[in-house]
Each structure stands twice: as C-alpha cells, then as structure tokens.
C-alpha cells in the first residue's frame, strides 16, 4: 500500500516535470510552419521537422554581384540587424551551400511562380529562397520576416533565439495589381510618412501605391510650367491649416523608394471635378476668367474644369507631360469621379480627350468608375468604387477593372458607430467586412479575368497624422492584402481572425497604431 502510494507520487512528479520541460521547449521553439501567421496566406506551406536558427555567423548569400538581388539581400539584412544585434553580412555565393546561412537565388523555375512568386525552403541548416524575378525574391523576403518571431520587427535588440520552423512554401499572387491609395490632397502627408506607408504595404506584398495628388482642397505636386498650382493651390488643406506639396525631386525620391520595394506609384490628378485648387490658382482656367476661392471644407462635387476652353487641354497636357516624365510606372490616374457640375454631354468628350493626351504620352489611363460612361481607350482601366453598372460598362468595352468597393475596401469608413475618425456614407466597415468579400463574384458581369486587381483607398478628410492613418489602415489593409493574394476565392473569417490575432504581436513590434477590433481574439496571443 505504502509502496504503491510512493510510486504514484513519483510518477506524478515525473509526469509534471516532463510537462514542464515540454512547455519550456515549446516556448523556445516556433510552432510548425503551416500554423504560423503569414499574411497574405501562402498558396502552400508544408511543414517539415526541425528549425533553422539564425546566428551571429549567418550570412545572406546572393547569386549575383551587385544589381537588384544584392539590394534585396541588403534589404533583408537591414531588417534582421536591429532586433538580432547581429552584423548580418550579404555576400555573393561561392559554390557549395554551407550550413547556417540564407541563400537568395534568381533562377527560372516553375512558370506558375510568374514574376512575383517564390519558393522558400527552410531546412534546419539552410534557408533557400528562389524566384524567377527579383520581385518574387522580394516577396519571399517578406515571408522570411514573418516566419521569424515577431520581435524581429523591433527596432531595438531583443533576446531571441531567432528560429524559423522547417518546411517548404510555394507562393504566388492571384491578382497582378494589389494596392493602397493615400489622399494627400485633403490633408498633406510628408515624404517620410508616405515612405512609412510604402514600407508597411510592401510587408503585405502589395505592389501599387496610388497617390491622390490633387483635389478641391489642395494641389500637392510641383508643376514647373504652372507654379501657382503649388504656391497658391498647395497652400491650404481641410480645416484651413497650412498645406504642402512635393517638389518633383521629392516625388522622384518617393518613386525610387517605392521601386526599391517593387511598388509602382500611380499618380492621380482628379478631373474634371475635384479641381478647385487649380481653379483658385489660375483665373484663366475658369469659364468666367475669375479665380475661385481656396476651399478648406469637405463637400464634394461642386467644381469643374471649363471643358469648352482650349487652355484647359493645354494645361492638362503640361501637367500630365511633366508627371509622365517623372513617373516610370505605366499608369496615370485621371480621376473622373463625382463631376456633379459638369454636364454629361461635356464630361464624355472631355474624358475622351484626356485619355488621348495620356495615351500619347505612352501611359495607360486609370479612372474612377464614372469614366466607363465615355469611350474607353484600349488600355484604360476602370476603378470600381460606387456604381456596379459602371464597372460592367467598362468590362463591356474590354477594360480591366480595379476593385475598390467603398463598402468593403475604403479605409476611411468608420469601423463602427464608436469610431471617432472617418466617414460612414458607405456604411461601417469592420475588420471582417474588409476581408470577407470575393472580388471575382462581387459584381455580376465582372469576372476574375476582367479584374486587374484590388486597391484599398484612404481618403483623408478626417485623417491628419500618421497615428490616425495607421488606426484606420490597420488591420483592414491586411485583410485586403490577403484577399488580393490568396488562392481561395472566398475568405474564411474563422481561420483568418486567428491568423490576424497571432499577427498582433508583429503589429506591436512595428509600432503600428492599429484598431484593436473586438472581432479578433488578440488577447489569446498578445500575452
Ligand atoms: C471617390 O470615392 N469619390 C472615388
């Protein structure tokens, strides 16, 4: 009897000890690769046994000297160094792969990977990332970042260890155009703010940053032939405070910064409406020859170009000419929305002529969905935001559609009735609503093959600084990034909300002021 009691006591001690050891071991080693929180979700992630450990001796080896692949290696090193405190070096591969290192290789592999896909193999001794093109490697680097513990995103040294669970990821996007828009016209955002936004969208494998550069309240890009646009038109913003603008040099700096992150800048000059800042800058643009007053309110739809004046088209040619010269990307966005005081019989020939101006500059047109009321040029794309019938009209003309449905993808809509920032004319857009929609079935008549991609716009009538911007953008942008990339058409909110909750620690490490939606079980993962 006594012996049995002692025996069971001993067993209890052993079992408890074993469980404690297991918990400790678990705490130190990452979960299996397929259960990690990668956003957007990879096409396939197959776990294997073991972990790769990054050490102070680990080197990032690249398959060529100089050029883009070297820059991508440097980008990864720069992301790893602050939190690890290691002096991770980037070197050119010399023959055989050796233990403890990361290898980035450009090689034509599976066609399915296309220009932006990648294949990542994590073994306990080596990480190997391969892609057909540099953009694919860059996307793979974002996945590597997300596979490390969240602390890797910290800007100060963290304890580690820096392990990644072994496995193989094969990954490529569904949509070619995956973007966000920032309205710098209603409230101006400095170059460094735009760069931070670019960094953040790149982390989620987005590849387009659309800048809304002009509106009734402000003109934000230097045009050398028309200097009043910035000296007068750029001087104010919503609420009456000082505005601002980008010099062409600053804009080029943004373009370069974006390109280094495989992001294309799409500049927008909104017309024929939303044009008061220009009309206030030059009296000769107005039908009555008188400059309008600067406007710092938030009403929409009251301004218009004088479509019957020839100077209007000279002005537009100059603007887009200068903009095309500093924009390497293929698109110029011409706006075209809410031209409520331009008669339709004036709007149609106006937009047709502007399309010709842009096309002659060797650029493709994007316009808000209203431009589908005109005769679209062969390469024009229609950005659906409000009217499904316009998107369908665009498709019937053979145009591609960018899906930005306000009720799902507008980042300036309030999350719910308690959100102090934002607007709600398209309804509340909670975190699940921005995630749970399928671009390929949302609008009957707009099929997957008609869709160029997805874009999440942030209008800034009520957004004045980065803290507020981040609160409105995060976490909704992650849901949009996930659906723009993911292979499954319909979202699985139950699965995604856990992935997002696990991702919370990473948002914190990146010091992102995100909205802590009650629909997401953050608390289970943020201990
Ligand atoms: C828009 O929201 N007016 C395109």
Image (cartoon, rainbow, N blue to C red):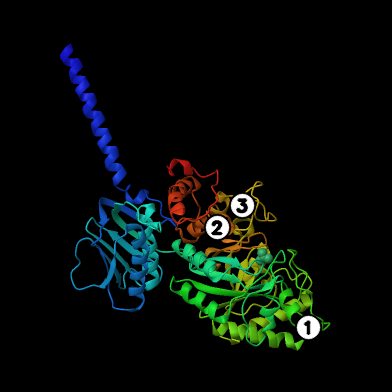
In this rendering, the label closer to the viewer, 3 or 2? 2
- The CA span between labels 3 and 2 is 15 Å
SS state under label 2:
helix
Location of mark 1 (residue): 283
Of 225 and 330, the residue lying toward us: 225
Q: Quadrant of the C terminus?
A: top left
Residue 429: image tag: 3
Question: Do we see residue 54 in this rendering?
Answer: yes
42 left or right of 100?
A: right
84 left or right of 291?
A: left
In percent of width and height, residue 418 lies at 65, 46
For ligand 1, give the image quadrant: bottom right
Residue 317 found in image quarter: bottom right
In percent of width and height, residue 430 lies at 59, 50
Q: Residue furthest top?
A: 1
Which residue corresponds to the image point at 29% horizontal and 55% vertical from the top-left?
167
Looking at the image, tell me whether mark 2 or mark 1 is earlier in sequence order: 1
Which residue corresponds to the image point at 58% horizontal and 71% vertical from the top-left?
211
171 left or right of 4?
A: right
SS state under label 1:
helix
Asked if the residues shown at circle 1 and circle 3 are in contact, with their CB atoms under 8 angstroms apart, the answer is no
- The CA span between labels 1 and 3 is 41 Å
Location of mark 2 (residue): 470
Q: Disc count in the image?
A: 3
In the picture shown, does residue 379 fall above or below 165?
below
Question: Do we see residue 330 in this rendering?
Answer: no
Of 122 and 444, the residue lying toward us: 122
Q: Residues within 10 Å of mark 2 (few under 14, many from 20)?
A: many
Asked if the residues shown at circle 2 and circle 1 are in contact, with their CB atoms under 8 angstroms apart, the answer is no
């Amino acid at each position: 009897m006594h012996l049995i009691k002692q025996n069971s006591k001993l067993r209890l001690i052993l079992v408890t000890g074993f469980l404690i050891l297991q918990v400790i071991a678990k705490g130190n080693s990452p979960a299996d690769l397929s259960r990690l929180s990668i956003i957007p979700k990879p096409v396939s992630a197959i776990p294997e046994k073991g972990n790769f450990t990054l050490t102070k001796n680990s080197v990032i080896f690249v398959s060529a000297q100089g050029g883009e692949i070297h820059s991508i290696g440097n980008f990864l090193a720069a992301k790893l160094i602050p939190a690890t405190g290691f002096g991770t070096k980037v070197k050119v591969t010399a023959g055989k792969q050796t233990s403890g290192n990361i290898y980035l290789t450009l090689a034509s592999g599976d066609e399915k990977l296309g220009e932006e896909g990648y294949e990542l193999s994590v073994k306990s001794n080596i990480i190997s990332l391969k892609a057909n093109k540099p953009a694919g490697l860059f996307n793979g680097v974002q996945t590597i970042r997300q596979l490390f513990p969240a602390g890797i995103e910290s800007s100060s040294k963290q304890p580690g260890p820096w392990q990644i669970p072994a496995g193989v990821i094969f990954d490529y996007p569904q949509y070619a155009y995956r973007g966000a828009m920032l309205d710098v016209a209603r409230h101006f955002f400095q170059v460094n703010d735009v760069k931070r936004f670019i960094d953040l969208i790149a982390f989620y494998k987005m590849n387009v940053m659309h800048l809304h550069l002009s509106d009734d309240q402000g003109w934000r890009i230097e045009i050398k032939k028309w200097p009043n646009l910035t000296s007068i038109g750029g001087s104010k913003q919503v609420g009456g405070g000082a505005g601002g603008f980008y010099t062409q040099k600053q804009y080029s700096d943004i373009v370069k910064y974006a390109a280094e992150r495989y992001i294309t800048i799409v500049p927008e000059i909104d017309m024929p409406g939303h044009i008061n800042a220009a009309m206030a800058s030059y009296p000769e643009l107005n039908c009555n020859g008188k400059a309008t007053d600067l406007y710092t309110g938030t009403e929409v739809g009251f301004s218009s170009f004088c479509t019957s004046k020839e100077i209007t088209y000279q002005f537009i040619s100059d603007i887009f000419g200068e903009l095309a010269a500093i924009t390497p990307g293929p698109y110029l966005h011409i706006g075209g929305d809410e031209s409520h005081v331009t008669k339709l019989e004036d709007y149609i020939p106006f937009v047709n002529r502007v399309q010709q101006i842009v096309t002659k500059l060797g650029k493709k047109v994007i316009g808000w969905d209203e431009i589908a009321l005109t005769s679209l040029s062969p390469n024009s794309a229609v950005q659906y935001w409000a009217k499904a019938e316009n998107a369908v009209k665009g498709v019937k003309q053979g145009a591609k559609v960018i899906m930005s449905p306000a009720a799902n993808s507008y980042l300036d809509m309030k999350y719910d009735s308690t959100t102090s920032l934002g607007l709600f004319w398209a309804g509340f857009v909670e975190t699940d609503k921005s995630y749970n929609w399928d671009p390929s079935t949302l609008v009957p008549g707009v099929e997957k093959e008609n869709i160029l991609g997805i874009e999440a716009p942030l209008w800034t009538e009520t957004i004045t600084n980065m803290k507020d911007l981040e609160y409105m953008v995060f976490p909704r942008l992650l849901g949009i990034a996930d659906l723009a990339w993911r292979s499954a058409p319909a979202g699985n909110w139950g699965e995604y909300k856990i992935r997002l909750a696990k991702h919370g620690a990473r948002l914190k490490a990146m010091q992102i002021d995100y909205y802590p939606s009650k629909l997401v079980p953050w608390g289970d993962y943020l201990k």
